């Protein structure tokens, strides 16, 4: 009997999984059958209404005077101490013979926005054609500010005529008109008498739409009446004494809804006068839209300061250190200028990458004659891209502006189930955020003076953090490569193992040699010192690479190097997870940032041939969840402090990405603020910091910035490269360009450094270059110290002897003398002439050899 029971139990256990699956299926079916999907309600956006005012709206703070035309919301801005008047839009846009009608509408618009739909189709609205002409906006003046509440959409234009009016009042107004005019107006109104309805009239519907019909005979404006007729009717009623208050009262009698099928959007723009600055704000909390048609982008003042065909001037854009686009330069066959502020958001997917655009500071400007302005992007700059174009393409005006991404989107791969792309949007806008940009006006047309104005802004914004440095020699960044990973065969199995390139003791020896050779003010970046090497595993904990030596060896190296007046920084990756698993403390489903689709933010390299993702599992890596990335940044700083060193961030201060983690999302702007908080805290606690690139919000807290993009991409539409950003920060933070010995063009890199006031950077390793063969680190092929030592000393000794005294000074001047020759000037009168050309050049008695620089004092 026991044997039978045992067999029955065994049979039941075998069937148990199937029984459980069946129960789950049955339960799921029952749930679906008995559950009603929630009904998606369309968001009704109530449009604003223009109050009919005719007098200009004026605010004046003694330094600036803003005068707004209430019929269009265009405005002029007078800078009182110079008398210069800037305009929100070109003054003759409506008569521009080079522009089509739709382009004329854009040129007359102080606001442009676009919306998108599930299929990704983007539609652009302009405030003149979709708001001002329709009368669906309101102007709210305040103390030194004007708020304009725009509704944008294909809404019927509002006219001051009665939509519904009682018979008595209607006949009263008609009695004040000529009989011919009254007869004309009667044709466009339909009379309704509750006691004399026709068979076609729906009594219940009429009572619902016009409740007053129960006691009064009424006249209702016919919906098919065209705008030109409505305008005529408005003029006649106005002449008869009909007022806007009468219109509002009559509008209350109309409860009918003539909702348009086209979407309507509400966007508020606030113009504030602050001293000699115009501040423009767009609050997120005032954005209204239906979730089926989310706002995709917003561009405030797209044509502010636009230069016309007869104007002389230029536009300043943040390409590299800065670049100028001259008005009417004739390059109409070239692509317009476009760059993402702080580069690409890595939490937003993209199919292919041809070229990464990025600016490390959010500033643009316009110069015209003896006047100029710079526009500094403040709140919300993490969402911005800066774009510029010249006259002669779509119209006759040169313009530059900032375009903000609002509702981010992600494309779904739906395979064969749909013929079009499907997009999902992030509709959870942070209501406490505001887009703001500050226009500061300069009584000079010089980009040097524009840069000095920006420098003043930075010093005020980061008071106490951008004081002049005390360098007495050239700052030199020395990157020492500790270990890389290389695949080795272990028991026939390919396994990644650290490969030593420079041990801690060898690193100390290299710096000692350089010190003995006269190199000082070195900022030593130790790369690949922990957690497996250069492509380190996550910093859940830090463990030195055994092949490089012990922790004591590392401490001794740091102590020895810093005893000679140099600074050591331990480099780390804090925002990404490379080649890490549970054993390293990384679980991708828990620790990776999330995309809009809530999938893990798995990233791939992009092919240089096809530009598409190289979806190879060995080449993928993950963007870390924001809070975890910040934790790893803290871990890096703790480890650096343990060894008495500074902290070098490979990515923090350069890369900036949002995180759509369901339980704890972070907008890109929120991540920016958290990065600022971290960097400021480390700096305040005395930890020296080194960062790459140097985003404008990060440099105030860094002692050294490496790999700053000095020249950018020299797009054809650009006319000149200028050190705008360097003019603003030189002498207040040390920075370098790319490593001279491994960037592919050492001669150019030295010339860039001389023109842009940069320090020098080199990357070295102890092992021979052949050690990097059969690895993914061939970038270090030219890093062998012994091979480059003499050349490095030659470059350094000359550069330091001629320019070492300038690094604690402000850069006070710059001029492009020709397309190949420039001159940079410092506070003490030092001038640096740089010749990129292949022919000698003489200026003011100074001979500048080809492909060289000359310093005069």
Image (cartoon, rainbow, N blue to C red):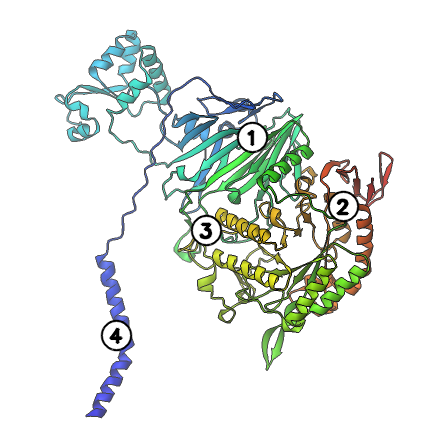
For marks 3 and 2 on the same chain, the one whose residue lies earlier in the sequence: 3
Q: Nearer the viewer, mark 1 or mark 3?
A: 1
Query: Which is more toward the observer, 673 or 746?
Result: 673
Q: In the rendered image, which quarter contains the N terminus?
A: bottom left
For marks 1 and 3 on the same chain, the one whose residue lies earlier in the sequence: 1
Query: Which is more toward the observer, 715 or 360?
Result: 360
Q: Could one spot residue 297 in this view of the protein?
A: no
The picture places residue 135, in percent across and down from the top left corner, at: 39, 25
Residue at x-position 76% and y-position 50%: 474
Query: Which is more toward the observer, 76 or 810?
Result: 810
Numbered disc 2: secondary structure: helix
The picture places residue 347, in percent across and down from the top left corner, at: 49, 53
Circle 2 is placed at which residue position?
754
Circle 1 is placed at which residue position?
277
Q: Nearer the viewer, mark 1 or mark 4?
A: 1
- Location of residue 489 with respect to 33 vertically, above or below: below
Q: In the rendered image, which quarter contains the C terminus?
A: top right
Circle 4 is placed at which residue position?
19
Structural distance between the alpha carbons of marks 4 and 3: 43 Å
Q: Could one spot residue 201 in this view of the protein?
A: yes
For marks 4 and 3 on the same chain, the one whose residue lies earlier in the sequence: 4
Numbered disc 1: secondary structure: strand
Numbered disc 3: secondary structure: loop
The picture places residue 279, in percent across and down from the top left corner, at: 52, 32
Dot 2, how many residues are within 10 Å of its Cα: few (below 14), some (14-19), or many (20+)?
many
Structural distance between the alpha carbons of marks 1 and 4: 73 Å
The residue most toward the left is 195
Residue at x-position 27% and y-position 48%: 39
Structural distance between the alpha carbons of marks 1 and 3: 31 Å
The picture places residue 311, in percent across and down from the top left corner, at: 64, 25
């Amino acid at each position: 009997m026991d044997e039978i029971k045992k067999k029955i139990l065994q049979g039941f256990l075998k069937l148990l999984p199937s029984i459980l699956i069946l129960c789950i299926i049955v339960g799921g079916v029952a749930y679906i059958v008995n559950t009603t999907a929630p009904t998606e309600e369309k968001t009704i956006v109530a449009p604003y209404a223009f109050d009919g005012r005719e007098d200009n709206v004026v605010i004046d703070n003694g330094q600036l005077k803003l005068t707004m035309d209430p019929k269009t919301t265009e405005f002029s801005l007078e800078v009182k101490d110079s008398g210069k008047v800037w305009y929100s839009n070109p003054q003759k846009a409506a008569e521009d013979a080079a522009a089509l009608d739709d382009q004329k509408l854009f040129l007359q618009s102080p606001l442009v926005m676009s919306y998108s739909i599930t299929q990704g189709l983007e539609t652009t609205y302009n405030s003149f054609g979709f708001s001002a002409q329709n009368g669906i906006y309101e102007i709210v003046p305040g103390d030194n500010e004007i708020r304009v509440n725009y509704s944008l959409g294909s809404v019927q234009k509002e006219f001051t005529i009665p939509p519904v009016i009682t018979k008595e009042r209607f006949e009263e107004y008609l009695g004040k008109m000529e009989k011919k005019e009254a007869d004309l107006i009667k044709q466009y109104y339909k009379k309704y008498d509750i006691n004399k309805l026709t068979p076609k009239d729906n009594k219940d519907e009429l009572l619902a739409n016009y409740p007053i019909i129960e006691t009064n005979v009424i006249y209702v404006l016919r919906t098919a009446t065209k705008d030109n007729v409505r305008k005529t009717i408005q003029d006649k009623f106005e002449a008869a004494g009909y007022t806007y208050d009468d219109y509002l009262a009559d509008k209350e009698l109309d409860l009918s809804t003539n909702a348009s099928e086209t979407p309507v959007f509400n966007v508020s723009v606030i113009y504030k006068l602050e001293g000699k600055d115009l501040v423009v704000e767009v609050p997120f909390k005032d954005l209204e839209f239906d979730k089926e048609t989310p706002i995709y982008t917003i561009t405030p003042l797209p044509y502010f300061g636009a230069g016309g065909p007869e104007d002389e001037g230029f536009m300043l854009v943040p390409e590299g250190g800065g670049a100028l686009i001259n008005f009417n330069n004739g390059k109409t066959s070239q692509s317009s200028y476009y760059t993402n502020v702080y580069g690409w958001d890595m939490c937003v997917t993209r199919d292919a990458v041809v070229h990464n655009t990025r600016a490390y500071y959010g500033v643009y400007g316009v110069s015209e004659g003896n006047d100029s302005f710079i526009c500094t992007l403040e709140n919300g700059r993490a969402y911005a891209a800066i774009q510029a174009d010249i006259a002669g393409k779509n119209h006759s005006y040169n313009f530059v502006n900032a375009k903000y991404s609002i509702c981010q989107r992600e494309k779904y791969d739906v395979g064969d189930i749909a013929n079009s792309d499907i997009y999902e949007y992030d509709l959870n806008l942070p209501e406490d955020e505001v887009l703001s940009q500050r226009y500061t006006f300069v009584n000079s047309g010089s980009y040097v003076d524009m840069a000095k104005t920006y420098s003043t802004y930075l010093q005020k914004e980061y008071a106490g953090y951008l004081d002049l440095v005390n360098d007495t020699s050239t700052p030199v960044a020395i990157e020492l490569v500790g270990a890389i990973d290389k695949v080795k065969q272990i028991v026939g199995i390919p396994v990644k193992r650290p490969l030593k390139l420079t041990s801690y003791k060898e690193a100390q020896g290299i710096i000692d040699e350089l010190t003995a050779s006269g190199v000082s003010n070195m900022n030593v970046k130790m790369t690949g010192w922990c957690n497996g090497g250069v492509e380190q595993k996550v910093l859940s904990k830090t463990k030195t690479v055994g092949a490089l030596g012990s922790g004591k060896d590392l401490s001794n190296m740091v102590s020895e190097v810093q005893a000679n007046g140099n600074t050591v920084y331990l480099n780390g990756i804090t925002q990404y997870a490379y080649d890490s698993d549970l054993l390293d403390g990384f679980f991708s489903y828990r620790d990776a940032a999330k995309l809009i689709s809530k999938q893990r933010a798995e990233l791939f390299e992009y092919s240089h041939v096809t530009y598409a993702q190289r979806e190879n599992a060995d080449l993928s890596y993950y963007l870390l969840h924001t809070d975890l990335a910040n934790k790893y940044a803290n871990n890096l700083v703790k480890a650096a402090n343990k060894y008495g060193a500074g902290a070098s961030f490979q990515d923090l201060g350069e890369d900036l990405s949002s995180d759509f983690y369901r339980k704890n999302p972070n907008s890109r702007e929120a991540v920016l603020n958290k990065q600022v908080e971290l960097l400021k805290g480390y700096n305040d606690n005395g930890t020296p910091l080194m960062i790459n690139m140097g985003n404008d919000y990060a440099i105030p807290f860094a002692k050294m910035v490496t790999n700053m993009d000095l020249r950018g991409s020299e797009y054809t539409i650009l006319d000149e490269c200028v050190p705008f950003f360097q003019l603003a920060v030189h002498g207040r933070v040390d920075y370098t360009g790319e490593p001279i010995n491994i960037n592919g063009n050492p001669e150019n890199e030295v010339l860039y450094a001389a023109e842009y006031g940069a320090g020098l950077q080199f990357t070295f390793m102890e092992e021979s270059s052949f050690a990097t063969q059969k690895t993914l680190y061939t970038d270090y092929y030219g890093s062998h110290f012994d091979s480059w030592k003499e050349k490095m000393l030659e470059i350094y000794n000359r550069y330091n002897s001629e320019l070492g005294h300038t690094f604690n000074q402000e850069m006070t001047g710059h001029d492009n003398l020709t397309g190949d020759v420039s001159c940079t000037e410092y506070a003490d009168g030092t001038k640096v002439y740089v010749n990129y050309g292949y022919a000698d050049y003489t200026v003011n008695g100074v001979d500048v050899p080809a492909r060289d620089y000359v310093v005069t004092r």
